[in-house]
């Protein structure tokens, strides 16, 4: 097997040690083998990125835009194969794998356009005869650290704006899904980017730490758990690097008595269990008013029991496996914790056997839970959701906000008054009306508040807030 999987200074290089990437739908299927980047190679990658900055900066905007566009086109052209690879290594059903890769292609195309739209402003000074110009400039070398649940779109969501706004990057993807990152770099290698502009280092926490603790980095954009993100931020701040964190969630979906019933059930099932609940925006807390509660729980439970759990590449699979043994053990431990707290298990929560050996878990729905239970306070990050019964809208909003997290929040109702009030008063970075808490557009800001995010938001035009710094120039007119 070829294990030269680190991409540094425009060349594929071998690291040390071996990392095996296993298909969670079928653990007998080894997706690929990789070698881990050494700390010295992380430093080399950062130096290569630094050296590429002036080369990239000297290229015309047209050439830069075309390079990003070419990456987007190549991804979209190969989306079937890339989606299959992604589903094989991450375990989301094939249509979702292809959907994610498509999004990655669209992100590159969006930022290909943004290359041409980066503008500053010129304005009069308060002093006579003086003009002021305010211009965005690249930040420099940015370290990117990404999680396993979006192996293609999260790296794309960071790399595309970073280079569009003139920076160079070093990406460390999750050690559980390096194959999709390698495939993305193989595409970028062909797109006319200067050597060293984009670098890939494979590995786990040690490689991430080597990146985060480097004094040569100007910024870190991190997506992952809140605990790790805060460690990374502390290192970056100590070195004077800027930080952007996209973190975990415990997202509420409020269902009121007057909700469009079928829409609400679909929002709950999709938001809580699709992609195995392994979405930062998953609806893990279903907050339901008492008039509709029993009927809603019954309808969601019926749908949940009918979901087809299986191999990610098998046609008709609706819920794939959990990512690995460790996450499966964590999910199952929360099933036990919830039971121990007195929650009523209405559906699922059991390890399943399929034709191939994988990490299959039947989606678990709990009812009769209380907002203070651990199942309602801690992120599980699996196909586990719980229902909290509330009296009315006011109590629903209070429970929705009673969490340290604040990523996405949804409400299902037909009353405008509640829809508007919720949008204004729920403490979350994103709100949804009669839509699942998960599933967002690629051209608008994405991110959370409270323990779900830190620093400027990602995505859309606001991505420039993190990936550029402002220079103010004063000019004395003749
Ligand atoms: P994680 O925090 O365990 O790992 C994230 C990345 O950090 C990985 O690449 C990992 O190797 C690296 N890492 C681990 N320890 C490190 C250290 N000490 N220093 C530097 N890097 C280190 O998260 P995960 O399990 O990969 O992903 C799941 C988490 O990601 C969930 O909490 C989920 O909510 C969150 N997530 C958030 C978003 C968002 O946009 N808000 C999107 C996807 C996932």
Image: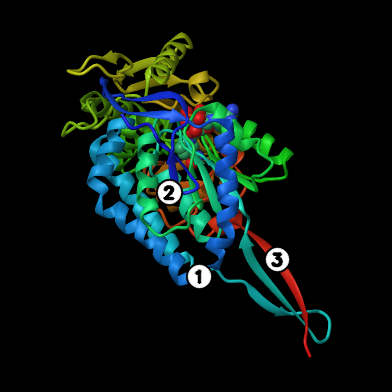
Question: Which residue occupies the extreme bottom position in the image?
Answer: 478
88 up-or-down from 241: above or below: above
Left or right relative to 25: residue 457: right
Q: Which quarter of the figure is the C terminus placed in?
A: bottom right
Say which residue appears at 24% left-offset and 29% top-offset. 303
- Residue 401, how many percent across, how many down? 56, 36
Identify the residue shown where x is 52% and y is 50%. 458
Residue designated by label 2: 156
**Residue on which the image places disc 3:** 471
Q: Which mark is residue 117?
A: 1
How far apart are the alpha carbons under marks 3 and 2?
Answer: 27 Å
Instruction: Report the front residue among 32 and 223.
Output: 32
Is residue 434 depicted above or below 474 in this figure?
above
Disc 1 from disc 3: Cα separation? 17 Å
Residue 475 position in % (x across, y down): 76, 80
Could you tell me how far apart the alpha carbons at marks 2 and 1 are, in whole angstroms?
19 Å
Location of residue 69 (image quadrant): bottom left
Callout 2: SS: helix
Crowding at dot 1, Cα within 10 Å, few <14 / some 14-19 / many 20+, comes out as few
Categorize mark 2 by other alpha carbons within 10 Å: few (<14), some (14-19), many (20+).
many
Residue 225 appears anywhere in the view? no
Q: Quadrant of residue 402?
A: top right
Between 271 and 141, the one lying in front of the other is 141
Left or right side of 355 for 319 = right
Considering the numbered disc 3 on the image, is that residue within a helix, a strand or a loop?
Answer: strand
Query: Is residue 196 placed above or below 374 in the rendered structure?
Result: below
Residue 31, by quadrant, is top left
Residue 125 appears in view? yes
Earlier in the chain: of badge 1 and badge 3, it is 1
For label 1, the SS is loop
């Amino acid at each position: 097997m070829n294990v030269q999987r680190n991409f540094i200074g425009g060349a594929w290089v071998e690291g040390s040690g071996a990392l095996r990437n296993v298909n969670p739908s079928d653990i007998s299927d080894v997706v690929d083998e990789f070698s881990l980047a050494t700390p010295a190679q992380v430093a080399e990658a950062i130096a290569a990125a630094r050296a590429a900055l002036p080369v990239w900066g000297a290229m015309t905007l047209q050439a830069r835009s075309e390079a990003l566009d070419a990456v987007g086109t190549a991804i979209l052209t190969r989306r079937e194969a890339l989606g299959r690879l992604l589903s094989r290594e991450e375990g989301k059903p094939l249509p979702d794998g292809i959907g994610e890769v498509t999004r990655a292609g669209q992100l590159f195309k969006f930022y290909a356009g943004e290359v041409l739209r980066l503008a500053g402003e010129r304005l009069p000074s308060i002093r006579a005869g003086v003009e002021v110009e305010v211009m965005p400039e690249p930040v420099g070398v940015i370290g990117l650290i990404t999680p396993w649940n979006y192996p293609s779109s999260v790296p794309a969501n960071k790399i595309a704006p970073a280079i569009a706004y003139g920076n160079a990057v070093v990406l460390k993807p999750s050690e559980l899904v390096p194959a999709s990152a390698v495939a993305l770099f193989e595409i970028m290698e062909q797109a006319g980017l200067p050597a060293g502009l984009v670098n890939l280092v494979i590995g786990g926490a040690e490689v991430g730490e080597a990146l985060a603790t480097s004094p040569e980095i100007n910024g870190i954009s991190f997506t992952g758990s809140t605990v790790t993100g805060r460690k990374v931020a502390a290192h970056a701040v100590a070195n004077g690097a800027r930080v952007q964190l996209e973190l975990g969630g415990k997202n509420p979906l409020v269902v009121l008595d007057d909700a469009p019933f079928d829409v609400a059930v679909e929002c709950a099932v999709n938001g809580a269990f699709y992609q195995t609940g392994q979405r930062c925006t998953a609806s893990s807390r279903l907050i339901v008013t008492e008039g509709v509660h029993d009927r809603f729980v019954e309808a969601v439970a019926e749908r949940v029991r009918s979901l087809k759990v299986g191999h990610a590449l098998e046609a008709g699979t609706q819920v794939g496996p959990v990512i690995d043994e460790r996450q499966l053990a964590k999910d199952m431990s929360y099933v036990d914790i919830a039971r121990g707290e007195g929650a009523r298990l209405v559906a699922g929560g059991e390890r399943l056997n399929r034709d191939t050996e994988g990490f299959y878990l039947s989606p678990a729905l709990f009812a009769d839970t209380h907002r203070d239970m651990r199942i309602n306070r801690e992120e599980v990050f699996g196909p586990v959701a719980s229902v909290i019964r509330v009296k009315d809208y006011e109590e629903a909003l209070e429970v929705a906000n009673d969490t340290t997290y604040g990523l996405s929040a949804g409400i299902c109702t037909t009353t405008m008054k509640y829809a508007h009030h919720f949008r204004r008063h729920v403490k979350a970075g994103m709100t949804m009306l009669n839509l699942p808490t998960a599933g967002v557009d690629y051209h608008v800001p994405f991110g959370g508040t409270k323990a779900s995010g830190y620093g400027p938001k990602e995505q859309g035009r606001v991505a420039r807030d993190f990936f550029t710094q402002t220079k103010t120039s004063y000019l004395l007119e003749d």
